[in-house]
Amino acid sequence: MTERKPLRIGMIGCGEIAYTATGPAICETSNAEMVLAMDPVPDIAESFGRRFDIPWTTTLNEVLERPDIEAVLISTPHDTHCSLTEAAARAGKHVMVEKPIACTLVEADRMIAACREAGVWLSVNFVLRYDSGPLDVRRLVASGAIGEVIAVSFRSVGRKPDHYWTGGYTNRVQTDWRKYRKRAGGGVLIMNFIHNLDLLRFMTGLEVSRVYAEYGTFLTPVEVEDIITMTLRFHNGAVGALVGATCMDGHVRLAPVSLGGSRTEILHETVEDNSDRIYGTRGQIRMQGRHVWVYTRESVEGLKRDDWTRLDLTPTNARANYVEAFARTVRQGRPPEISGEEGRKALEIVEAAYRSCVEGRPLTLPLSLP
């Protein structure tokens, strides 16, 4: 096989993220293609197949038994990720799975082991790593532009529409799995803020060593949390503060970043400041929207010294970039850039935060498993 032959993908789950984001992204790639769509709900599978002009089915085995399908992309409720990944691995298919990798670390370990034993690759769709902003910030931090990282502040505060909990952002698929802890694994942290945790690790190169968190469900009729605050300690001694919420009024609706959404502009003074910041010994970086601001005390090409520089980001399709990177590494026989182990590391921070809330104390990583 040459690297130029497109990776043939079977879609497992044709709901919101697949229909609105992943399907269109794969169509933009040069080295991957969808060849079959599967969803247990006939109308959902059929509408996906019609939109992307590919065959569709309601039967999982039709995907797993097709010899020409080399990889699957799993876009299903969180509590199904483990069993579907194990089935795909047994069938010899490489796996891309939407974040989070699973609801629990025990399930994540089962998925990693199943793919390793079957000799297939497992990757978690932390697609925002492939956006221009995180890539630029990663390079700036690695270059020493702000010195050693000593603190981070990440924030994602807004309101999800009421219908999100039974129909997602698009209201296309009627399902209530997002409302329940057993099925979703949790609320804003595991559903959304896990992206921020992954980006934090990716951009800074730091690993979390201790977590303390508090959460609550205040304004949403669900089991899962709609607000969480977290305090982090990193292996180099740096500290972090994170706030996530999906129930706050008075500003724009939370943009579904994983769907490529954008915010509606309103008066600046009314908008919640959802910027993320990385503080160093020689400066800091602020990220918000399509801009990155850098303050540095160093002499860095392209940046003002002892002043702020605004960097305008080049628009890119991060999800398409992710799929292309996965297909490329499969063809080259290399592990994916975002492996199952990387997905597990983000989930471990999430699980530590949830345990911390229940136990009322900080928890040290790595966690002991039950």
Image: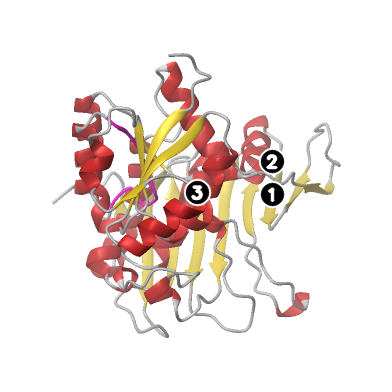
Residue of label 3: 52
For the residues marked 2 and 3, what is the alpha-carbon distance in whole angstroms? 45 Å
- Say which amino acid is labelled 1: Ile
Is 241 situated above or below 234? below
Q: Is residue 33 magenta?
A: no
Residue of label 1: 285
Q: Which is closer to the viewer, label 1 or label 3?
A: 3
Asked if the residues shown at circle 1 and circle 3 are in contact, with their CB atoms under 8 angstroms apart, the answer is no
Asked if the residues shown at circle 1 and circle 2 are in contact, with their CB atoms under 8 angstroms apart, the answer is yes
Residue of label 2: 146
Find residue 281 and report its image quarter: top right
Q: Position of residue 146 (x, y in %)?
A: 69, 41
N-terminal label among 1 and 2: 2
265 sits left or right of 117 in the view: right
Q: Which is closer to the viewer, label 2 or label 3?
A: 3
Please indicate, yes or no, whether residue 301 appears anywhere in the rendered image.
Answer: yes
Is 300 situated above or below 165? above
Which residue occupies 41% across, 20% down?
334
Q: Position of residue 224 (x, y in %)?
A: 32, 73
17 sits left or right of 93 in the view: right
Is 115 situated above or below 207? above
N-terminal label among 2 and 3: 3
